[in-house]
Image (cartoon, rainbow, N blue to C red):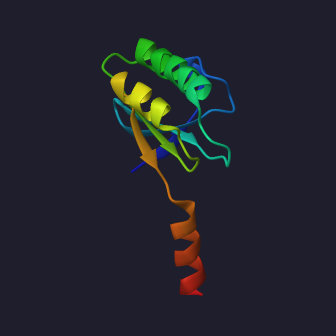
Amino acid sequence: MKEQIDPKPYGLPPRTVLMKQGPEKFVLVINRKSRIIMKDALTILKKVEKIKEKVQGASVILETSAPVCSKSIKFLKENGIDVVLKNIWRQLITVISEK
């Protein structure tokens, strides 16, 4: 079960959405419409490094509804960050069809 936690103790900006799945498993959530490009991937990596400084052996997953460029996905995976793409349209269709 994921629970949202305060990002400040990890040295992250207060607008960062950070979830915790277990004692050493974190989820960084980015919900936006614009594409995640390499510049964003570098910022994400810096945030993950700050989390890993505070919690030894932590693993971090990026969960996003935004499209991610293939170069950024490869870069993040090389640095140990799994990327989970949420399909917002599938969720909307499910909600509409249930009504």
Residue furthest to the bottom in view is 99
Number of labels in the image equals 0
Tell me if residue 27 can be seen.
Answer: yes
Q: Is residue 25 above or below residue 85?
A: above
Across and down, in percent, residue 71 comes to 47, 31
Residue furthest to the left in view is 57
Q: Residue at x 56, y 61 (%)?
A: 88
Across and down, in percent, residue 63 comes to 48, 44
Query: In the image, 85: left or right of 12?
Result: left
Q: Residue at x 59, y 47 (%)?
A: 66
Where is residue 97, by image quadrant? Answer: bottom right
- Residue placed most toward the observer, 69 or 2: 69
Where is residue 21, by image quadrant? Answer: top left
- Residue placed most toward the observer, 10 or 68: 68
Quadrant where the image shows the C terminus: bottom right
Tell me if residue 80 can be seen.
Answer: no
- Residue placed most toward the observer, 47 or 22: 47
Q: Residue at x 56, y 26 (%)?
A: 38
Across and down, in percent, residue 61 comes to 41, 36
- Residue placed most toward the observer, 49 or 38: 38
Across and down, in percent, residue 14 comes to 68, 28
Query: In the image, 25: left or right of 19?
Result: left
